Image (cartoon, coloured by chain):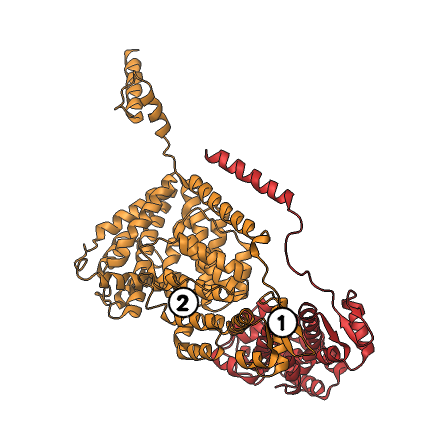
Chain colours: A red, B orange
């Protein structure tokens, strides 16, 4: 049996077990597949052309796509990044040779969402630049883009509401971690915007069901907040930024530098 | 990536067209001009005098604009040795061009491309000659010196092949990278600058931002060798930073670029840079000055951007969306569309700021309607984020559902004016220092001044004459003995 046929067979059972949710088995199959794929000359970094090149690349791309979904499902961000990095050259560089993948936009959107959760916005926008109009218009890509806009503007409630209608089942694994990011954002903003807030309201905002949960959160991240029986009192921010003292060292340094520079000119 | 060079050429051509028939009959370019220029490059390369090369490059400009295909063909035939691998390819490409491909302002785009490709071809012609001659000389004696300069020549060659013919193709990259490496190894600054810019343009034209950013962060751009290349580099860097949300850096780079660029030419480049500057400024939350839009030569091309700026300034989300929709194709062509989409939240911020300064206390319900947000809860979150980001200075009273502005702090009670003052002084001092550093001292000026200050010496005699005299005297003495 040729290596390619063997690989295709392995892939079929890999996909089946990944879809069934049999993660252990899927992972061991994935390892076998990866070892097998190292013998394919048509894949990067060799990139050799051959009679089977297109088929081999298609197989590799499909394997990597399922691997990306698998690691998203597990919430394993390291593995996700690795698989994404392996998938990208296959998607980008051989785009004209391979049949279009049905999962393309889902994978791209998932990657965007991942970058958003990690708060790597520069990379988020770089990835977005790479996409064509058709890709950008697909719901899977629109979803993280909208989320990013909500986060920028600060409509955190809409971010949280978005959890209820995800375009793809694998998105919800990352959305769970997005909740943490959003909570931090809300907490930081409330600290600046309110002088005090009732516990019930704070719980509603942060989407916490129990008071104990809120207490743990505050104790962990914002020990300076004061919790009373029914409200949180934030540390009042400084009333105004009037300079209490003159920054003498800085002023002296600046004046001296002016003097030396002027000396040089005159 | 909008091709800056191409715009450049088209702008130049349109400018020529606008001037009417003044330059209608330009001095036609002859084969000799090209040959002379090629000789200059060869001399520059052999004699290790960068100035000759620079002169050749500046003389290249008129040739580039007006040269005709048949003349180029002739020059190619004359200058290139038959065994040069690119010769056949070049001749074939030249034959494809219509012979009157030059100043026809009616069709700016195609025409610009042709001008550009011809320009590059010319450069290649010059370069290839230099290469050939240099190689011959290298065989003779001066092997090390000339060989060391060869990559420089090769860069010109690649300007041709790579900028025009393979412009958007990924397969130009390995060759360019190889060239860049060679240039770095041989400390060839102009070569480094050119290849680096070509690489950046190539990457950006395919939106490979990440790669472009990594390339730029791992290389050093030689800033002093060519002003034009430096401007281009700054523009590319500004674009990269802007797309990666690093607006402050982007703004500095783009401003520097538009200040450094030569003011009378390269209108296309200036326009492209100005557009980006405006967007970045808006993203920073600043409003560009009205005078920016009224500059000569900018009015028409900046019109959509003016409308956009006004919408952002008013903080009107509906108007903003209307304008973006109306000019979408323009913005897409300028490759600013994605940046503009990010402006939406700046519009909301401006709206909030306006409300905050007009009301001392406003209910969240009213605010929600004014800024056109969906829910009151959402409005509350948006406000609290704006407060944290320092856009507005206010306190939200959740119980009563209103937002109360804090008293405006007198800015003169802080050290902000002093810091602004310091920033300006530093800028002025930097300008002065750079001006001093940029001055060039001719090697013999000092001696001439010395000679003038000594009364007994004859002023007319130059150093060369003096040297000659001394030599003559020596010879006579030798003969005498």
Along the horizontal axis of the image, is B42 left or right of A236? left
Q: Is residue B369 visible?
A: yes
Disc ID at residue B404: 1
Quadrant of image for the N terminus of chain A: bottom right
The image position of residue B281, as x and y in percent, is: 48, 63
Camera-side residue of B335 and B475: B335
Q: Is residue A29 visible?
A: no
Along the horizontal axis of the image, is A161 left or right of B70? right
Q: In this rendering, which labeled residue sits more in front, label 2 or label 1?
A: 1
Badge 1 density bin: few <14, some 14–19, many ≥20, Cα 10 Å: some
Alpha carbon separation for disc pair 2 and 1? 47 Å
Disc ID at residue B2: 2
Give the residue displayed 73% in from the left and 72% down from the top. A196
Question: In the rendered image, which quarter is residue A82 located in?
Answer: bottom right
Give the residue displayed 39% in from the left and 40% down from the top. B48
Marks 2 and 1 belong to one chain? yes
Element on which disc 1 rests: strand
The image position of residue A29, as x and y in percent, is: 72, 80
């Amino acid at each position: 049996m040729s290596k390619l046929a063997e690989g295709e067979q392995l892939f079929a059972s890999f996909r089946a077990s990944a879809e069934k949710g049999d993660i252990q088995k899927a992972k061991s199959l994935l390892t076998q597949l990866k070892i097998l794929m190292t013998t394919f000359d048509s894949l990067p970094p060799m990139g050799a052309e051959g009679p089977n090149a297109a088929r081999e690349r298609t197989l590799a791309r499909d394997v990597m796509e399922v691997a990306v979904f698998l690691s998203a499902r597990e919430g394993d961000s390291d593995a996700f990044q690795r698989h994404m990095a392996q998938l990208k050259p296959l998607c980008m560089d051989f785009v004209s040779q391979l049949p279009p993948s049905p999962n393309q936009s889902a994978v791209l959107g998932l990657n965007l969402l991942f970058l958003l959760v990690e708060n790597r916005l520069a990379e988020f926008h770089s990835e977005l630049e790479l996409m064509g109009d058709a890709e950008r218009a697909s719901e899977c890509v629109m979803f993280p883009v909208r989320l990013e806009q909500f986060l920028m503007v600060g409509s955190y409630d809409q971010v949280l509401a978005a959890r209820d209608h995800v375009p793809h089942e694998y998105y919800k694994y990352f959305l769970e971690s997005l909740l943490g990011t959003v909570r931090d954002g809300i907490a930081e903003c409330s600290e600046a915007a309110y002088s005090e807030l009732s516990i019930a309201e704070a719980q509603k905002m942060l989407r916490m069901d129990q008071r104990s949960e809120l207490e743990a959160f505050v104790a962990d991240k914002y020990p300076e907040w004061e919790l009373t029986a029914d409200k949180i009192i934030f540390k009042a921010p400084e009333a105004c930024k009037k300079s209490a003292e003159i920054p003498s060292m800085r002023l002296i340094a600046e004046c001296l530098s002016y003097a030396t520079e002027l000396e040089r000119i005159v | 990536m909008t091709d800056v060079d191409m715009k450049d050429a088209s702008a130049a051509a349109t400018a020529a067209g606008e001037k009417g028939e003044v330059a209608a009959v330009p001095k036609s370019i002859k084969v000799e001009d090209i040959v002379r220029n090629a000789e200059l490059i060869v001399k520059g390369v052999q004699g290790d005098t960068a100035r000759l090369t620079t002169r050749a490059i500046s003389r290249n400009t008129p040739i580039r604009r007006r040269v005709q295909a048949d003349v180029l063909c002739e020059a190619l035939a004359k200058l290139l040795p038959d065994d040069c691998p690119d010769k056949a390819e070049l001749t074939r490409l030249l034959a494809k061009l219509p012979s009157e491909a030059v100043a026809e302002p009616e069709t700016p785009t195609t025409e610009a491309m042709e001008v550009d490709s011809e320009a590059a071809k010319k450069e290649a012609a010059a370069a290839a000659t230099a290469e050939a001659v240099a190689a011959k000389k290298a065989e003779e004696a001066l092997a090390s010196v000339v060989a060391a300069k060869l990559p420089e020549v090769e860069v010109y060659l690649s300007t041709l092949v790579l900028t025009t013919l393979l412009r958007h193709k990924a397969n130009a990259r390995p060759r360019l990278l190889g060239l860049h490496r060679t240039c770095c190894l041989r400390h060839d600054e102009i070569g480094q600058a050119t290849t680096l810019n070509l690489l950046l343009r190539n990457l950006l034209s395919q939106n490979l931002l990440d790669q472009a950013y990594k390339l730029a962060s791992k290389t050093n751009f030689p800033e002093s060798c060519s002003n034009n290349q430096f401007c281009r580099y700054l523009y590319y860097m500004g674009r990269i930073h802007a797309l990666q949300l690093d607006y402050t850096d982007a703004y500095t780079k783009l401003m520097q670029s538009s200040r450094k660029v030569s003011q009378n030419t390269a209108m296309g480049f200036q326009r492209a840079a100005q557009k980006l500057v405006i967007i970045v400024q808006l993203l920073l939350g600043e409003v560009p000055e009205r005078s920016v839009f009224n500059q000569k030569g900018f009015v028409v091309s900046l019109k959509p951007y003016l409308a956009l700026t006004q919408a952002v300034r008013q903080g009107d989300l509906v108007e903003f969306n209307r304008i973006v929709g109306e000019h979408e194709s323009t913005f897409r062509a300028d490759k600013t569309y994605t940046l503009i989409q990010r402006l939406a939240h700046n519009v909301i911020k401006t709206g909030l700021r306006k409300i905050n300064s007009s009301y001392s206390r406003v209910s969240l319900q009213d605010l929600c309607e004014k800024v056109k947000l969906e829910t009151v809860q959402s409005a509350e979150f948006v406000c609290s984020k704006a407060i944290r980001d320092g856009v507005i200075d206010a306190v939200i009273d959740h119980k009563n559902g209103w937002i109360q502005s804090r008293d405006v702090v007198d800015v003169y009670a802080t050290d902000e004016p002093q810091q602004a003052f310091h920033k300006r002084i530093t800028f002025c001092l930097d300008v002065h220092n750079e001006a001093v550093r940029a001055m060039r001292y001719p090697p013999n000026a000092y001696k001439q001044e010395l000679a003038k200050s000594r009364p007994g010496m004859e002023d007319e005699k130059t150093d060369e004459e003096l040297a000659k005299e001394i030599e003559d005297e020596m010879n006579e003495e030798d003969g005498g003995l």
